[in-house]
Amino acid sequence: MLQGKLITLDEFTIMETRKFPQATGELSSLLREIAFAGKVINKQVRKAGLADILGQHGATNVQGEEQMKLDVIANDTLIHVLKTSNDCSGIASEENDEVLPYEDTHSANSKYIVLFDPLDGSSNIDVNASIGTIFSIYRRVSPTGKPCEEKDFLQPGNKLMAAGYIIYGSSTMMVYATKLGVNGFTLEPSIGEFCLSHPNMKCPENGKIYSINQGNWVKYNEGMKSYLNYCMEENKEEKRPYSHRYIGSMVGDMHRTLIKGGIFMYPADRSNANGKLRLQYECNPMAFIMEAAGGKASTGTQNILDVTPEKLHQRVPIFIGSKNMVDKALEIING
Ligand code: P6P
């Protein structure tokens, strides 16, 4: 609130741009376009149970996952909105096998590229659990004036200009990070605007929640099992046993971790040598947000943001959340 007035996302991004006299406003404009796409997706998500858009689309994506109808709607919405934005030279989507350079002149002259997971956690759609859109914005490394190239999308997370998510939960929120910090905006449906509700978000250094699909226990190595036993053993001074919370939708689990503290983990296991979550579409954007909020994000052996991507859809293990909890987990797991 500014003197008791709601601050919209548009107003906020304009105020942030004014902090950099040399800024062109293109990044802010791109964030507003992504917010608009989020509003369109939100409208579809909120009526999914009434329209014939629940359930499977009848195709599988590049991940080999059943595409839900809403996945396809969200993907198409983001591709269209960003193509007409004039601020994006091309996209890469978790749902698409290859990068998608926009061929028109305006887009070829744009200096940013966007990666997104259009509807993360979509297996939760039919059970009305929180789902979300995750996005990353990089400055392209290829020359403007020509279509962007795959190398623009294979930059490490420490080169991110901005990253965020839109969570379609009990309310619809957009949370994004830039080098200035992390801010959260709640959609006010009566005016159709995202309004600043969580300024300058910080992840608590400590927490009492661990979040993992513990059903994979039998597939974990001994170090991982040791840490889970640590989470579950009694130690009143250290407020253990921790509570276990797991939604099965990364955006929902990460939003709780950002606000309440805790640790979210999707480790490697006997079946998935690199874990399940995608570096460029899920882990890097969430790591950028979490580290900007004072948290930590690791593959178990290095900071997520320092991983040099080799393939567009590569997966990495992830340990992310409250700094002191991630440090303790790595100490025990790698013990
Ligand atoms: P599992 C959703 O499919 C997702 O990509 C993330 O949103 C979520 O954290 C994870 O997979 C859940 O995976 O194996 O526990 O169902």
Image (cartoon, helix red, strand yellow):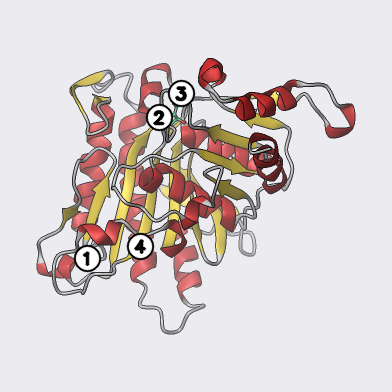
Comes first in the chain, label 1 or label 3: 1
Comes first in the chain, label 2 or label 4: 2
Q: Position of residue 148 (x, y in %)?
A: 19, 63
Q: Using a 10 Å C-alpha cutoff, classify the residue at mark 1 as few (fewer than 14 neighbours), some (14 to 19) or many (20 or more).
A: many
Could you tell me which residue is drawn at 52 percent across and 66 percent down? Answer: 179
Between the C-alphas of marks 1 and 3, the distance is 45 Å
> Residue 284 has which mark?
none
Q: Position of residue 195 (x, y in %)?
A: 51, 52
Could you tell me which residue is drawn at 77 percent across and 23 percent down? Answer: 241
Q: Which picture quadrant has residue 61?
A: top left
**Type of the residue with mark 3:** Arg
- Label 2 near ligand 1 (CB < 8 Å): yes
Which element type, helix, strand or loop, lies under badge 2?
loop
Could you tell me which residue is drawn at 55 percent across and 55 percent down? Answer: 183
Instruction: Name the front one of labels 1 and 3.
Output: 3
- What residue is shown with label 2? 121
Quadrant of the rendered image holding ligand 1: top left
Instruction: Name the front one of labels 4 and 1.
Output: 4
Which element type, helix, strand or loop, lies under badge 3?
loop
Residue 57 lies left or right of residue 140; in this view the side is left
Residue in the foreground of this view, choosing between 41 and 306: 306
**Type of the residue with mark 4:** Tyr
Instruction: Name the front one of labels 3 and 2.
Output: 3
Above or below, 97 relative to 12: above
Which element type, helix, strand or loop, lies under badge 4?
strand
- What residue is shown with label 4? 138
- What residue is shown with label 1? 86
Residue in the foreground of this view, choosing between 15 and 27: 27
Q: Which picture quadrant has residue 293?
A: bottom right
